[in-house]
Image (spheres, rainbow, N blue to C red):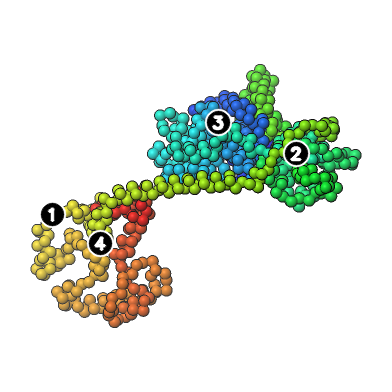
Amino acid sequence: MAATASASASNPFPFPSRRPPDDTLFCAVYPLPIPTKLPAPALLASLQSLHLSLLSHLAPFLSSHLFHRDPFTLSIPADPAASCALCASPPVPHLHGALRFGDSLPDEWLAVSLLFALTRAFPDIAARAWDSDGEFLLIEAAFALPRWLDPESAPNRVFIFRGELHILPPSLFPETPSLEAALAAVHDDSIDTRAPDAVQAAIQRRIAGLPERAAENLHTARVIVPAPVAKVLKEEPCLIARAVEGFYDRDIDTMKHAARMEKFLKVASGEGVEMVRTSVRMTRAMYAQLVQQNFQAPRGYPMPRREEGPEKWMEAELGMKIACGFEMMYQERRRQGEEGKGSTWEVYRKSLEATGCFEGLLPGSKEYNRVMDNAMQYYKSSTLYSRTREILSEPVRRIDEILSMPYSADEFKGVDLPPSDGDSWLYGGEEELNAELREREKELEEYEAAKKHRKSQKQSVSGGSKSQADQFKLGEITESMQDFVRKMSSFEGAEVPANRRDMESVDLDVNQFFKAMESVFGEGSQEQAGSDDGFDRKSSSSDMDFDDSDEENDFPEELGDKDMDDSFMESYSDALNKELSSTTLEKSFARAPRTGTIDEGPSNAAATDGEMTPVDVDLNLVESILNSYSSQQGLPGPASNLLGLMGVEVPPDGKKS
C-alpha cells in the first residue's frame, strides 16, 4: 500500500483484504465550492494542489511527532469522480484518510485538532471525522446537543468548517440532506449552520492545547538492545510502533520467532551480536504496553545479572521486549508476503491511467510527456510528506535496506543519551482521573439544571391549559366517533359531523319528521316504515346490542320470529365464545366490569365461568385513539387529525412534559 498520491487512496490500510479495524478514525476534506464541472485531468490537478498545500502546512508537526499506530495523513481517492468506498459517500471530490490509533485515544483527538487547524488555515475547505461509533464529536458534546439530533438524523449534518463545528438544522433540511447540498449550505455565509456555543465548548475542551501539547503524550526511555535493533531505530524511529505492536499482539506462532531471534540476534556467520545502549521515544501507551506485561527473555538472549542494579535491569528488560517485538513483527510479515508487490510509482501511474489522464494521448507525444512530468513531480513531492506511512506499511523492506548497509556497535558508544522520563504518570493518575470525573459531573449537573428549567417552563405554560384538561371528557371521543360512523356521506367521501361545541341550533326537516311519525303509528306506507336513515343519533356502546324491545311491544305479531332470532344468536354467541376462549384474544381487549347479578342462561354461563367476559367497546375505542395520539409525540398524525376534525381537544400528556 502506498501512502503517496497513489491513490493510496482506495485503501489506506496495510491489509487491503481485511475489514477496517474498530480503532480507526476516518476523515474527509472537501474543497469548497465543490468543483463538480471540471474534467478529470483538471479535477485531479486541483486535488493534487490542495493535497500538497495541506500536507506542507502540517509538515513541521508531522515530521517530528510520533503516533501510536499510524501517522496522520491525507490521500487522493483512486478515482476522484467516482463513489468512495472508504467514506461511503457519493462521487464528491475530496481527500480522505484513515488513522488507526489503537489503545492511544489521544491520537484520535490529535487528528481532530489537526482537522480544525486545517479548516482555520484554509477557509475554503470543510472536513468530516467519524469512527466505528459514528459521529463521535456529537457523542463528546451529548449533553449540549439539540434535542432533535440523534444518530438517525445526524448523517450529512455535521462538518468542521473554519475552525468550528457546524450542524445543519432540520429547519434547513427536514430530511437527510445530500452531501452536495449540505456542503453548499455550510459554505454559504448567509446561512447560519454554526453549532451552539455549548457544543463548541465541549469539543474545544477536548482538543484544547492541541497539537502543541501533543508532546506530553510521548515518553523517552533508555534501553539496552542488540546492535541491529539500535541501527533500525536510529534510521527509522517510527518503526518502534510496529515493534510494540508485534510484541503486544503476539500469539503462540509468533513467539516461536522470538525464541529463535534469527534476524536481530544473529549475524550471517552465526555469531552473536553486541548489545548497546540507546534512547527510544514512544507514546505513553506503547510504554505501558511494554512495561505492564510479564515476558520471559528467550533462551540465549543476553540479559544482565540483577546484581548489576535495578536501573540496568529495567533498561535491558525493556530493550529485550522491543527486540522480540521487532523479531516477531519482521518474521510474521515476511511470512505473510504482503509486501513487495510493485513500486508505489507503478501503482500511482496505473491509477492515473484508470482515471483517464492519458486518454487520447500517444505515448511519447509532447502532451503525454507533459502530463507524465507533472505526475512525476507531484509523486516526488507527496512522497516526502508520506514517507513515514510508507515505511510503516512496508517495514520488512526498509529493515532489510538498513541492515544491508555497513554499521558497527561502536557508533552507539560514547553517545550522550537523554535521561529516561519518569513514569509516575503510569501509577499515579488518580488526580487526572478525578479531574475528568469532576468535569463530567459538572456537565451532567448543567444538563439536569437545563432540563429542570425546561420542565418548569412547560409546566407554567401547561398551567393555563389545566382547565382544558379538567373540562375534557373521554365520553366525547366515543360520542364523536359514533356520530362519525353513523353519518351518511355522499359519493364525495366521508363527512365529519359538525363540532358539537359549536352547534347553537338544530335544523329540523318538518316533512321528514311527519313521515317518520306516520311510519311509527302505522299510518304511512310500508316502504316508509323503515325510512329513518336521515337521523344521526347519539348512542353509547350499548346501542350496538340492537335492543328491539320497543319494537316488540309495538309489533306483537312478530314476537315468535324475534324469539327464534334471539335463540339463534344466543347459540351462535355461545359457540363463538367457546372457540375463542382458548385463544389470547380475550387479553387484547379491555373488559366491562361484572355486575352483581348475572342472568342465568347458556349465553351468560360462559361469562360466569370467566372465559369470555363482555368487551367494553367505549373503553377500547378511547384507549386505542389515545395511544395512537400519544405515539405521535406532538407531531401531525391520523389520531390528532381525526379528533381535530370532530372538534375534540385532547390535553397534553403530562407524563412526557
In the picture, the disc for residue 222 is: 2
Q: Residues within 10 Å of mark 3 (few under 14, many from 20)?
A: many
Mark 4 touching mark 2, by CB under 8 A?
no
Answer above or below: position of 454 versus 389: below
Mark 3 touching mark 2, by CB under 8 A?
no
Q: Which residue is mark 4?
A: 475
Q: Residues within 10 Å of mark 2 (few under 14, many from 20)?
A: many
Residues at marks 1 and 2, CA–CA distance in whole angstroms: 99 Å
Q: Which residue is mark 1?
A: 505
User: Upstream in the sequence, badge 1 or badge 3?
Assistant: 3
User: Upstream in the sequence, badge 4 or badge 1?
Assistant: 4
Compared across the picture, whether 548 is left or right of 657 comes to left
Q: Nearer the viewer, mark 1 or mark 2?
A: 2
Residues at marks 4 and 3, CA–CA distance in whole angstroms: 64 Å
For the N terminus, which image quadrant? top right
Foreground residue, 273 or 219? 219
User: Upstream in the sequence, badge 4 or badge 2?
Assistant: 2
In the picture, the disc for residue 248 is: none
Q: Secondary structure at mark 4?
A: helix
User: Upstream in the sequence, badge 1 or badge 2?
Assistant: 2
The amino acid type found where label 4 is placed reads Gly
The amino acid type found where label 2 is placed reads Arg
In the picture, the disc for residue 117 is: 3
Query: What residue is rendered at 65% in x and 47% in y?
Result: 427
Compared across the picture, whether 195 is left or right of 235 comes to left
Residues at marks 4 and 1, CA–CA distance in whole angstroms: 22 Å
Q: Nearer the viewer, mark 1 or mark 3?
A: 3
Q: Residues within 10 Å of mark 1 (few under 14, many from 20)?
A: few
